[in-house]
Amino acid sequence: MLDTPCVIFAGGRSSRMGEDKSLLPFGTFNTLTEFQLNRLSKIFKNVYISCKESTKFSFEAEFIEDIKTDYIYAPTAGFVSVFSFLKCEKFFALSVDSPFIGEDEIKKIVEADRADADATVAETPRGIEPMCGIYHRSMEKKFTAMLHENNHKLGFLLKTSNTIYVEFRSKKPFLNLNHPHEYQEALSLIV
């Protein structure tokens, strides 16, 4: 099991889905978040869930609630909260809506990470995947500044930081469940 803590980001607005995707049923689990927690707990020693309000979930977990801001749905609020809550030097960030990123992809990112990096993230033929990778404490001040400036462009932050990009040729494991048709496709893939 990996020592680096994992944080599942489940605090998004889900506007394209039309309902809170973190609460959608998935596989044999009542929610996509529970599914992610169960599978990632077999890879990482410690798994946390970053969210706006933990009361929306009906299962036990280690929750990190986002700081309260006008733009609470931005991932930057989650990153600032995670850095404040966790006292470690780095953590693995993964979006709740990426249920097919597996142990092989995760280990490849972990193995590519270096102590002098600010971040180590996946890159697919589709582009960079900011919500799949390791973020170091050296990024904490940058995230805090972004939050105060109401700037939430993770791609720009990564390009202006010491980021390691880990190349993946297949985009299949990186399927994001942003729209209802993607959710239906994902359900058919786990049967």
Image: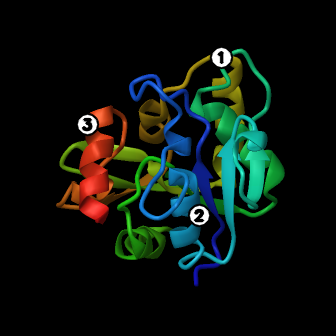
> Which of the numbered marks, if any, corresponds to residue 149?
1
Q: Single out the mark in the foreground, 3 or 1.
A: 3
Which residue is pictured at 25% across the width and 36% down the height? 181
The residue wearing badge 2 is 37
Question: Which secondary structure lies at badge 1?
Answer: loop
Q: Quadrant of residue 88?
A: bottom right
Q: CA distance from mark 3 to mark 2?
A: 23 Å
Give the left or right position of residue 169, taking residue 29 as reference: left
Q: Nearer the viewer, residue 131 or 182?
A: 182
Which three-letter amino acid code belongs to the residue tagged 1?
A: Glu
> Which of the numbered marks, if any, corresponds to residue 181?
3
Residue 97 at least partly seen? yes
Which of the image's four quarters has the N terminus? bottom right
Q: CA distance from mark 3 to mark 1?
A: 34 Å
Which residue is pictured at 54% across the width and 27% down the height? 13
Instruction: Give coordinates of residue 147: x percent, y percent.
Output: 67, 25
Q: Quadrant of residue 93?
A: bottom right
Instruction: Give coordinates of residue 67: x percent, y percent.
Output: 79, 32
Which three-letter amino acid code belongs to the residue tagged 3?
A: His
Above or below residue 38? Residue 134 is: above
Which residue is pictured at 42% across the width and 61% down the height? 27
Q: CA distance from mark 1 to mark 2?
A: 32 Å
